[in-house]
Image (cartoon, grey):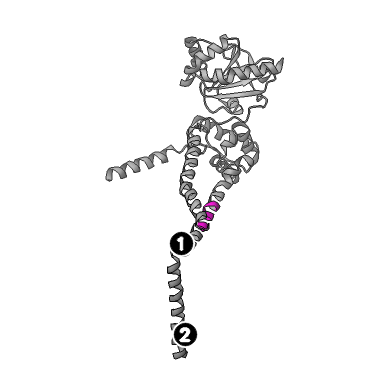
Amino acid sequence: MAGEVPKKRTTLRRYMPLIIFASLVVLLAVGLSLNPRLVPSPLIGKEAPQFKLPLLNSGGTFSDADLRGHITLLNVWASWCYACRQEHENIKYLSRSGLRVIGFNYKDENADAKNYLRQLGDPYQAVVVDADGRVGIDWGVYGAPETFVIDPKGVIRDKRIGPVDADYINDELMPLIAKIRSEMS
Amino acid sequence: MTRLALLLLLLIGQVALAMPVDTFKFKSEEQETIFHRLSNELRCLVCQNQAIADSNADLAKDLRNEIYKMLQQGKSEEQIIDFMVQRYGDFVLYNPPMKPLTWLLWFGPLIALLVGFMVVVRYIRNQRSLVVASELSTDDQQRLAALRSDLKQARSTSATSNNSEASG
């Protein structure tokens, strides 16, 4: 009897390093597959920060109050931003499908921004100009493109960091918009 | 070898060159110290392994400006840190705050150390008992006991013959 108990223990112990190794591999695999560039925004679930910025194509201004009353996509872009060109067709698609898309022209030259929209098409209902990036800081912007989803109450519901692609539209954006619509009705 | 040394020297030169230079004027030395401490504690989100003090990224420059402005307005260190965390999250802090979400981060290494220590202690203990219990057969144990009693006898006889050494 006394001889059997340690034997059982040794078989478990023999596999122990393997078990520890396997769990480490799983932990590291999960850790490595996360993208460290995607920093979750603390603004999600909060009201959009207050701002008032000039519009690109007219003399008027646009403020956080103008975000209310619609589901709005606030798309941070710039003419110097390469990934913005990648997502531009998708932004156009979303705008065509009836979503209200507001452009947030981030640290750009007005002439360059207008040129960009002339060349690639203008999907935006309005483009606000944040030339020095000061309002961008309030929005926690740290690069372009970034896209915020804002509900009719003016609450930020999601933030997409990086280009809006088909996966994001189908898997996250559309379900979220459906959810917001059902909350409103 | 010389090539490698030269290359290293070149790289070191690059690092030194890459330090951003701002021309801020501070009201007091204390304010300047706070500025440098803050910009070294806050992470640049564009180049994530640099503090905003070391980064040449545009955003880091903007954030240094912002810190400077807030200091000029008389904002405290906590207010400035809150400002950053509200916008960019805990991620901007090189010193993560203590809260349930970060307990594993703070105490994980200590737990790992304790578990490791317990494993080592148990391992050593088992090793000891294994040597005595399993490596000697009953015959061997009897022989060992016999040898031990022989040794004891031998010692006691030598002790009686030489009293001065017995006390030692």
Closer to us: mark 2 or mark 1?
1
Residue name at image x 38 percent, y 42 percent: B12
Q: Mark 1 lies on which chain?
A: B
Quarter of the image for the C terminus of chain A: give it.
top right
Q: Which mark is residue B156?
A: 2
The picture places residue B55, in percent across and down from the top left corner, at 48, 36
**Quarter assignment of residue A170:** top right
Q: Which chain carries label 2?
A: B
Kind of residue at disc 2: Ser
Tag 2: Cα neighbours inside 10 Å, few (<14), some, or many (≥20)?
A: few
Q: What element does badge 2 sit on?
A: helix
- Do tags 2 and 1 sit on the same chain? yes
- Which residue has dot 1 on it? B134
Residue A122 vertical position relative to residue A140 in the rendered view, above or below: above
Q: Report the predominant secondary structure element of the magenta stretch.
A: helix
Tag 1: Cα neighbours inside 10 Å, few (<14), some, or many (≥20)?
A: few
Magenta residues span B114-122
Confirm whether the magenta stretch covers residue B100: no
The picture places residue A124, in percent across and down from the top left corner, at 57, 12
- In space, the residues marked 2 and 1 are separated at their CA atoms by 31 Å
Which of disc 1 and disc 2 is earlier in sequence?
A: 1
Residue name at image x 46 percent, y 44 percent: A18
Is the Cβ of the residue at disc 2 closer than 8 Å to that at disc 1? no
The picture places residue A158, in percent across and down from the top left corner, at 61, 24
Most foreground residue, A40 or B109: B109
